[in-house]
Amino acid sequence: MRQTEAFIRTKREAPKDEQSVNAKLLARGGYVDKLTSGVYTFLPLGLRVLRKIEHIIREEMNAIGGVELLMPALHPKELWEETGRWKSVDDLYKIKDRQEREFALGPTHEEVITDILRKRTLSYKDLPFYLYQIQTKFRDELRAKSGLLRGREFLMKDLYSFHASEEDRKKYYETVKKAYIKIFKRCGLSPIVAEASGGSFSKESSHEFQVRTPGGEDIVVFCAKCDWAKNVEIAGKKAGEPCPSCTHLLKEDKSIEVGNTFTLGTKFSEAMKAFFVAKDGRNKPIVMGCYGIGLGRLMGAAVVVNHDEKGIVWPHEIAPFDVHIILLQSKDAKTQKRIAGEAEKLYHKLQGLSAVLWDDRDVSAGEKFADADLIGAYRRIVISEKTLDAGKVEVKRRDSNKARFVSTRSILNQEL
C-alpha cells in the first residue's frame, strides 16, 4: 500500500482530552479517531490491526472446537427480566421503540444464547458443543477514560460452552484457559491468570487474564514462584504476605485485564428453562461456561506494553504491516530516478510476500523516520543514494536499535 493512498494522518501531539498511553499513541499514529468518550472509529491502520487480532482469535477458537455464529445486538427486555438482570445490571443501555417496547443494547449475550438453546430439543448425545461470536457490545461505562481499555461501544469475542455435567465443563474450562494464553502470547503479551469474582454472571469464581504494566488500571496480587494470583479487590492478601499456596512472599503490580472466563453452571439454563434429555430420560438444565476477550482492549493493551518514546512497537503477528519502505530523496535528478525505480521494484516484489507500506510522500527524511517509528510497523527498509551505491538496502526492526545493510536478493528470499 502506498502511503499517499492509505489515509494515514499522523499527529505530532496527542489530543488534549486523551489521558491514557494507548489512546494517545493510537490517535497520533492514525489508528483511531475518537467520536465521543468511550466510542472510537478504527481508521484503516487500526482496522488492519483489529483484523489480525480477530484472525488469531478465530484460529485458536476453532482449534478447540468453537463454531462461530452472530447474535443480535438488540435484546428484548423480556429476556433480561427472566434472569433478573434487567434491573441488576447497572451498565445496561435501555431504549424504547416508537411502540414503547423496551430493549437493551447487548453488553453480553447469555440471555440470547440460552434462548436459542431452549428452542431446540437437545439430548445428552448432543453435548458438549461450543459456540462463539465476534460482535459489537454496548455498556454504559461511567469511567470511559482509558482509551480502548474501557469503552462504551466495543468489539468482543464471546465463547459459550454447553455440557451435560460440571465435570465436563471444568475440563473444557482448562482447555479455554490454555487457548487464551496462546492468543495473548501471539499478540505479544504474557498474562497472569488471576482468580476473580463472577460478578453478575455467576456466584462461582472466575478468572481474569491480567497483563502486568505500569500503565494498568487494575491491581493484581500474585506469587512469582507458583501460579497463585488474584485481583486485589477479592484477594484478602497483600504484597509482602506469604503466598497461601507455597509461602513465598507475594508481590503486587498494576495490570490490564485482557480476557476473562466465567463459570455459569446452570444459572441461566434454570432461569430460562433450557434443558437437555439425560441418559435416564429426565430433563436436566444445561451446564454452561462463558469466555470473553475484548478485541479493542487487547489492541490497547498491546500498545501500553509495547511502545517507547518514539511510538508504537507492534508485535509481529498484529503489526499493521510487516515492512515499511522508506525512500530518501536525492538532490541529483538521475540518482533520484534510480532510487524511485528501485523502491518501486522492491515494493511490487515484496507485496507477494508480506504486507507492505511504501512511504512515497514528498516530505523530509526526518518526517518519514518519525512517522515510521510512531506507526510501528514490524521492520523498516530504507532505500537511499548511500544504499543504492552499495547495492543494498538498510533494514531495521522496530524493536531493535541496530540497522543492517542487506542485498535486495536476500530480502526477496525473506532473509531479514
Image: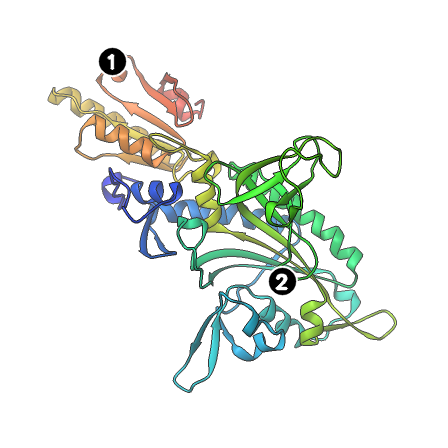
Identity of the residue drawn at 64% across and 54% down: 197
Q: Nearer the viewer, residue 361 or 141?
A: 141
Q: Quarter-wise, where is residue 270 in the image?
A: bottom right
Location of residue 214 in the rendering, given as x and y in whole percent from the top left corner: 47, 36
Q: Which colouring convention does the figure follow?
A: rainbow
Q: Secondary structure at mark 1?
A: helix
Left or right: 333, with 26 as reference point: left
Check the image and report above or below for 355 versus 270.
Answer: above
Identity of the residue drawn at 16% across and 23% down: 336
Q: Secondary structure at mark 2?
A: loop
Q: Nearer the viewer, residue 19 or 365?
A: 19
Location of residue 268 in the rendering, given as x and y in whole percent from the top left corner: 67, 69
Instruction: Give the position of the C terminus as an image quadrant.
Output: top left
Q: Quarter-wise, where is residue 36 in the image?
A: bottom left
Q: Residues within 10 Å of mark 2 (few under 14, many from 20)?
A: many
Left or right: 18, with 216 as reference point: left
Q: Nearer the viewer, residue 147 or 2?
A: 147
Identity of the residue drawn at 29% across and 24% down: 382
Q: Residues within 10 Å of mark 1 (few under 14, many from 20)?
A: few
Which numbered disc, 1 or 2, marks the residue that appears first in the sequence? Answer: 2
- Which residue type does callout 1 highlight? Asp
Q: Quarter-wise, where is residue 277 in the image?
A: bottom right
Instruction: Give the position of the N terminus as an image quadrant.
Output: top left
Left or right: 135, with 172 as reference point: left
Residue extending farthest to the bottom is: 99
- Which residue type does callout 2 highlight? Phe
Instruction: State the residue position of label 1.
Output: 389
Check the image and report above or below for 126 versus 346.
Answer: below
Disc 1 from disc 2: Cα separation: 65 Å
Check the image and report above or below for 69 versus 412.
Answer: below
Location of residue 220 in the rendering, given as x and y in whole percent from the top left corner: 59, 42
Instruction: State the residue position of label 2.
Output: 201
